[in-house]
């Protein structure tokens, strides 16, 4: 039974005779010029794919001769013979049709060749012609990472697709086949780094960097290495205390510094190409340099110094804020925290430190402003952190395809270097010459049969990786690709699925989170509506709704001054009530319920309207899906149908709770007299 | 260091010379006329108490002669010789001064003697004279029970004083000394039954009635038996499925009935005087007879039939309601549920079934109406269930002495048999001739050094037991007793502590729960303020606050009709807005914030006033306590001081959240212009 395990590497049998014959004729004999583990993995993938799709495998030629209809090579001389461009980045590749109905895949490295092979297989899965192609690809971002928030007890923080594929019962699962399949899937879309333990590093996980676990970490790293993926670990900043028996983790203490130097050396003895460490310090009760009155630069640089001799890097998260805030204190604004902490120390970080910055200043809300830190630190490496796992966006029970959201973020113009300084141009290093930069994201996979719980949530993982490779790809193109790879090239299916995906974020936003307000969820697990759930809490997450109005005044004029953290053009956009886009109105301003939006509706009427519309549109999603019953494998079809039905019921709960809450609070009737409880 | 482990059995050295001499002179030689384990336990207790208090022990005379200054006996002939009343209940006792400065303690049973000994020791601890006393005591309630909500993993549902003293890691702790000390403490105040596993019987606890655990249950029962306490177990109604491998637990299925008969027989092989079973059926996702379209009478009687041959009884909880309610449905009222379910089947239950009814129709709120079920079932045994553990009343972090609340409940006139039919007269069996009845309560102990977390919370356990023995005791008398037993007879200490205790429930009510509204707590753990915490939930727990008013309309005229479940006098009291007592106003009526209370304040002003006052009074509690520093042992003094300080801080949080919530919702200013956020 097809439960979706293969994700986008399905390699379904091609039944279109014309296409089949084209592929069979040009894919006869293979020659590859080097024998690395990665090249062999590429060949294995190729053979498996072909045998499944076109029912034959390539005959491997030991020596290069004219019979070779497919050449895999990293040798420039061979590439040049075939007039192939050789000026590409290390991970880049070229696929070119060459004379006599032949193909060459050239990579600067074996990883490039592997990527080229996956590209070829993608072309075949989507039944593209291989004639007259000349594809030159190289990644826009050098770091294209995933963060798994997996704990060694097998649980996954914010995981919604079963338990960990890496850990169980405080040990590794040692399900190497599954880890390898994950590596294949990730490599097929260009992911090149993974930190596979939770950024909240608890007692057990602290020991991952000790000889008790390093041999097994190395085994995992071996698998990922074969697929071009570097292994990172999240570390506990207080490790010198927890593991070293010291009484301090002060980054300026010489013994602490020596401890980390020794530790780095030890790690690299097990994993010679270890990527480096990911650090959540001084955040949500995690230890960090603040304990010792040191700056985050002090804290990060100490680690950077220890890992630099081995080319390791330090991914240092900027998610630092006061999580014990007094809700009565209206002057403190969590949104300001990352900028306030990090902007003043621009330029103080070592070259092998990268600041990992969440897309927004709060925490992966359905809609929030972008972090003003992007572009504000020209002298410090930055990378963008996104969240694929749907913590605040329906937890893989609701359909919420995030590529459109990510596109908005990547394309957001910071004005850091004047007009046209989008976030993507900062994190890819093209604005400031960063030594290390790129994109990372919190993964959405677990050990569910289909990896992601909701089968359609596979599209988020796929889409993220494609954008990390090339942020210029359009949402439509990525969606079309994924739909074809997953459900085949049937036009109706591709169109229906693509439409469902592309609408889904807006639908989810409609019945949950009006006008950028955020946080109206149940505390802790973050699922389902709870308008006051975070209103009187310590987390700095408020909407300030009263009988007259709602929203957070973050202006310089009358509020927290957060708008001042943006470059001038954006500051002016957000500061002035009349300029501020509707969808972020309540993120930046406190307004009466009767305030008129650009759309013409009042705020309260907008709340009512969008919540009623959102439910109708959720019903529409299911209706669309049901139209595909005959064309989707039953297990996947039924699984998705059930989730869409739950989504409808839960959307009604959202609608009614939010509408009732604001009706009870404002006393203002719905203009259209719909049922509000 | 004195951390409060001994609770009210401290037996402190008596330093008052006059008192000491009196006791020493009259307590010289002991004779007891039977040798049961219980009598020996009584003698042990006596010797330990005397040796500690008056620094000598009694000389035991093998034969009764004139030297015996203290006689313990169950022989009527001996009692009669000394002109002692012998017409008493089985558990009753007489303590009488007899000629030549001697004392006799006569019990109908050895348990009576034990109780008499504990009474004598209490007199001595409170330094009462033993001259010219003639005390005749017998319990008003035949069942005086405790329910421990302990799970076998060691956790305690709603426990706030450490983990279980009975279980850890899915086994018994086998800390028999601690269990014995618990039994001594309970016997000293007349508790005679205990169900020591949680009413929510999970997988592991289901097995307590199997040979895997019954030998150890029997060991616990042996300890409790020595102290006159019968052992009960909470059982899983679906045991025939879970343990018996059957596919049904239908109470009318013959195989199921046989399974339970065999099970009862098996239990009694291990514990010949096993008390019986406690059952939470069809409640909060627990299995029950509803699954099979059977009534609760069918369900309970099936068990009753199995346990009757061994004189076992079935304690059947009436906490049955729809816990998957739709908050949008205003017609369903959880408060109605118990009466609606059980009243129609009055008289259908076997004689060895007792309905266990929570004091209120909701769930142990700070203030709620009493359950209308009391007195409404003349032909069915009833018992009252109270909650000692402070689930909704400050979780033993706040001082909240519940005896005044329980007194109100016990004295509440149901009018079931006309004027003067208080609840206490129903559950003690004096109104209707019940075969089994009494009072039970959820315990507040855990393995903390002082058993109850907050040392002053020991008073709740003490007070509960004293009321179960005799509901006519005044709160003031009980409080005075407990204060003396715990802190000695210093007048200042006794007065300050008593005042603190007696005020504390009203103080807690003031800063938390205005006018009987209830449920404004954080869901799940129930600690701290959350006005909408249960407002949009499935639990049937709402306040319906909007911009104009608040409260639940439970009238017949315009609401859910709940008031109709009371006898006429109470129905009229609650039905009419003008009659309804202020403290239950919002429990029965939905009123505007501007509604004027009997006190003269508006509802909104009452909310503001009581919340400001409550915090001031909480500050007063700490001030009172601090005045005793010189007179309380440091460990206890500091522990209580810390909790009182936390109480102040948390009371401020309550005050500010509640006031802000209602200010934001109503838009009405505080008349006194105090700070509302």
Image (spheres, coloured by chain):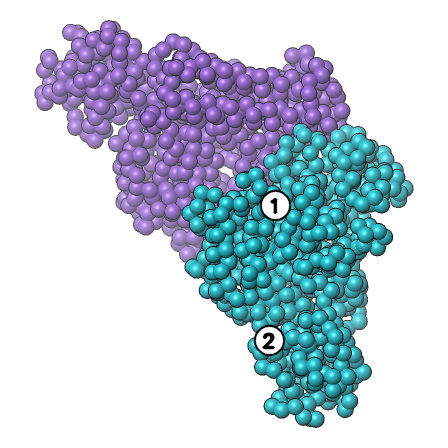
Chain colours: A purple, B cyan
- Residue at image position (78%, 48%) is B510
Chain assignment, label 2: B
Chain assignment, label 1: B
Is any part of residue A272 visible from this angle?
yes
Q: Nearer the viewer, residue B224 or B530?
A: B224
When the figure is inspected, residue B213 is found, relative to residue A340, above or below; the finding is: below
Few, some or many residues within 10 Å of mark 1 (<14, 14–19, 20+)? many
Looking at the rendered image, the quarter that the N terminus of chain B falls into is bottom right
- Residue at image position (38%, 18%) is A632
Mark 2 or mark 1, whichever is nearer to me: 1
> Tag 1's secondary structure?
helix
When the figure is inspected, residue B314 is found, relative to residue A654, above or below; the finding is: below
Looking at the rendered image, the quarter that the C terminus of chain B falls into is top right
- Residue at image position (69%, 34%) is B332
Residue, disc 2: B38
Is any part of residue B635 visible from this angle?
no
Mark 2 → mark 1, Cα distance in angstroms: 38 Å
Q: Residue furthest bottom?
A: B66
The percent position of residue A78, horizontal first and vertical second, equals 16, 16
Q: Nearer the viewer, residue A551 or A27?
A: A27
The percent position of residue B337, horizontal first and vertical second, equals 68, 41
Residue, disc 1: B296
When the figure is inspected, residue B82 is found, relative to residue A507, above or below; the finding is: below
The percent position of residue A606, horizontal first and vertical second, equals 66, 17
Of pointers 2 and 1, the one earlier in the residue sequence: 2
Whether residue B549 sits left or right of residue A385 in the image: it is right
């Amino acid at each position: 039974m097809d439960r979706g395990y293969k994700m986008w590497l399905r390699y379904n049998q091609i039944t279109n005779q014309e296409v089949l014959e084209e592929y069979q004729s040009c894919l006869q004999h293979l020659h590859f010029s080097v024998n690395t583990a990665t090249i062999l993995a590429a060949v294995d993938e190729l053979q498996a794919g072909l045998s499944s799709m076109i029912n034959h495998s390539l005959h491997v030629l030991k020596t290069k001769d004219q019979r070779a209809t497919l050449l895999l090579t990293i040798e420039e001389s061979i590439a040049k013979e075939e007039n192939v461009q050789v000026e590409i980045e290390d991970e880049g590749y070229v696929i070119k049709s060459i004379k006599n109905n032949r193909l060459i895949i050239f990579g600067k490295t074996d990883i490039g060749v592997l990527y080229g092979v996956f590209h070829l297989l993608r072309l075949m899965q989507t039944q593209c012609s291989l004639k007259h192609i000349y594809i030159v690809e190289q990644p826009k971002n050098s770091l294209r990472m995933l963060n798994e928030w997996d704990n060694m007890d097998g649980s996954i923080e914010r995981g919604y697709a079963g338990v960990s594929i890496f850990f169980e019962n405080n040990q590794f699962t040692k399900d190497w086949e599954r880890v390898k399949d994950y590596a294949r899937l990730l490599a097929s879309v260009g992911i090149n780094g993974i930190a596979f333990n939770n950024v909240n590093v608890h007692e057990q996980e602290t020991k991952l960097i000790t000889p008790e676990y390093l041999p097994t970490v190395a085994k995992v790293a071996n698998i990922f290495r074969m697929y071009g993926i570097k292994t990172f670990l999240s570390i506990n900043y207080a490790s010198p205390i927890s593991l070293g028996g010291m009484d301090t983790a002060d980054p300026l203490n010489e013994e602490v510094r020596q401890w980390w130097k020794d530790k780095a050396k030890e790690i690299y003895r097990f994993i010679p190409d270890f990527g480096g460490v990911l650090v959540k310090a001084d955040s949500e009760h995690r230890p960090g340099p603040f304990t010792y009155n040191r700056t985050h630069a002090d804290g990060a640089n100490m680690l950077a110094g220890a890992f630099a001799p081995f080319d390791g890097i330090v991914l240092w998260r900027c998610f630092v804020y006061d999580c014990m805030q007094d809700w009565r204190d209206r002057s403190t604004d969590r949104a300001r925290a990352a900028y306030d902490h990090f902007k003043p120390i621009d330029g103080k970080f070592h070259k092998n430190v990268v600041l990992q910055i969440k897309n927004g200043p709060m925490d992966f809300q359905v809609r929030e402003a972008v972090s003003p830190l992007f572009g504000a630190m020209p002298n410090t490496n930055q990378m963008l952190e996104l969240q694929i796992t749907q913590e605040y966006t329906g937890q893989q029970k609701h359909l919420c395809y995030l590529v459109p959201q990510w596109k908005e973020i990547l394309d957001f113009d910071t004005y850091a270097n004047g007009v046209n300084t989008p976030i993507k141009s900062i994190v890819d290093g093209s604005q400031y010459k960063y030594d290390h930069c790129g994109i990372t994201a919190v993964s959405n996979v677990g050990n569910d049969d289909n990896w992601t719980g909701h089968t359609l949530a596979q599209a988020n993982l796929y889409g993220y990786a494609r954008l990390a490779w090339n942020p210029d790809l359009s949402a439509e193109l990525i969606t079309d690709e994924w739909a074809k790879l997953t459900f085949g090239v049937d036009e109706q299916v591709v169109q229906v699925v693509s439409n469902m995906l592309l609408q889904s974020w807006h639908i989810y936003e409609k019945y949950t989170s009006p006008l950028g307000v955020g946080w109206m969820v149940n505390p802790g697990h973050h699922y389902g509506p709870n308008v006051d759930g975070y209103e009187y809490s310590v987390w700095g997450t408020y909407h300030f709704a009263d009988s007259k109005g709602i929203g957070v005044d973050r202006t310089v004029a009358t509020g927290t001054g957060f708008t001042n953290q943006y470059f001038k053009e954006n500051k002016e956009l957000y500061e002035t009530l009349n300029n501020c886009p509707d969808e972020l109105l309540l993120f930046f301003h406190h307004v009466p319920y009767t305030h008129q939006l650009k759309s013409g509706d009042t705020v309260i009427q907008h709340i009512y309207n969008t919540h009623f519309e959102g439910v109708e549109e959720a019903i529409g999603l299911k209706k669309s899906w049901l139209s595909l019953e005959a064309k989707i494998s039953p297990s996947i079809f039924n699984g998705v149908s059930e989730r869409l039905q739950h989504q409808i019921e839960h959307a009604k709960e959202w609608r009614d709770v939010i509408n009732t809450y604001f009706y009870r609070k404002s006393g203002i009737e719905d203009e259209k007299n719909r049922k509000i409880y």
